[in-house]
Image (spheres, grey):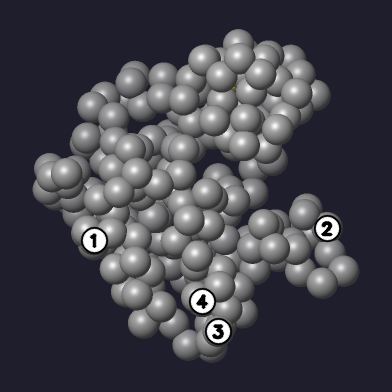
């Protein structure tokens, strides 16, 4: 896929951008950046598919809500990840002109992406690209969230029917905070890693 238009738009907004042919190449690049660092993860299927917890844990402290810290709950582990030097996450959609869109149930993912770290890294597969903001929000609500709910085996109509969002009031609802990030946040380095594979939801 040609990421060049989106990459150029994001560089103009202050992001650092790197492009990779496959997740293995991206993982090797990331592995080479860190030794002895404290790295937090937002809940991300893309990160899991890249096996970054296993790769980065060899030389660093990695705090990942998918791998609970010893004696800690999900909430405590996710909160600890917010105080890490570096933060890794993905997006649910990205517009052609470089607007990042994320939908979150608990808030740890969007909170970690906005403030408090030395640097944030977004790992983004080609399936996340959407031409416009309207199409990106549609994708987030009707594709990414139902697939996530299905993966988590939640009792929501989207997980059971698998076709679209029903704007439910289920106790299991995972769609509460919608973040539309127009440009890079001030005073925090942010790198976008485009990967030419379908990754995550
Ligand atoms: S609001 Fe409810 S139905 Fe819609 S995607 Fe989220 S969990 Fe599924």
Q: Nearer the viewer, residue 161 or 83?
A: 161
Which residue is at a point 53% across and 57% down the rendered structure image? 48
Q: Badges 4 and 3: C-beta atoms under 8 Å apart? A: yes
Q: Which quadrant, please, contains the N terminus? A: top left
Q: Where does label 4 land, which residue?
A: 56
Q: Which of marks 1 and 2 is nearer the N terminus?
A: 1
Spatial CA distance of label 1 from label 2 is 35 Å
**Dot 2: element:** loop
Nearer to us of marks 1 and 2 is: 1
Q: Earlier in the sequence, mark 3 or mark 1?
A: 1
- Side (left or right) of 61 relative to 78: left
Q: Where does label 3 land, which residue?
A: 58
User: Percent position (x, y) of residue 88?
Assistant: 49, 61
Nearer to us of marks 3 and 2 is: 3
**Dot 3: element:** loop
Q: Where does label 1 land, which residue?
A: 20
Spatial CA distance of label 3 from label 2 is 23 Å
Q: Earlier in the sequence, mark 1 or mark 4?
A: 1
Q: Does the residue labelled 2 lie within 8 Å of ligand 1?
A: no
Q: Where does label 2 land, which residue?
A: 73
């Amino acid at each position: 896929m040609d990421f060049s238009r989106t990459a150029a738009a994001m560089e103009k907004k202050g992001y650092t951008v790197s492009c990779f042919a496959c997740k293995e190449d991206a993982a090797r690049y990331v592995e080479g950046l860190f030794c002895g660092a404290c790295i937090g993860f937002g809940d991300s299927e893309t990160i899991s598919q890249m096996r970054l917890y296993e790769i980065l844990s060899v030389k660093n402290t990695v705090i990942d809500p998918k791998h609970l810290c010893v004696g800690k709950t999900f909430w405590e582990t996710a909160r600890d990840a917010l105080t890490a030097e570096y933060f890794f996450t993905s997006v649910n959609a990205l517009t052609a002109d470089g607007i990042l869109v994320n939908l979150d149930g608990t808030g740890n993912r969007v909170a970690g992406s906005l403030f408090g770290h030395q640097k944030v890294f977004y790992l983004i597969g080609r399936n996340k690209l959407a031409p416009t903001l309207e199409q990106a929000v549609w994708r987030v609500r009707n594709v990414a969230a139902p697939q996530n709910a299905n993966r988590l085996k939640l009792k929501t109509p989207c997980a059971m029917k698998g076709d679209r969002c029903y704007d439910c009031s289920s106790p299991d609802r995972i769609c509460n905070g919608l973040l539309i990030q127009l440009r890079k946040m001030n005073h925090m380095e942010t790198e976008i890693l485009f990967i030419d594979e379908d990754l995550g939801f």
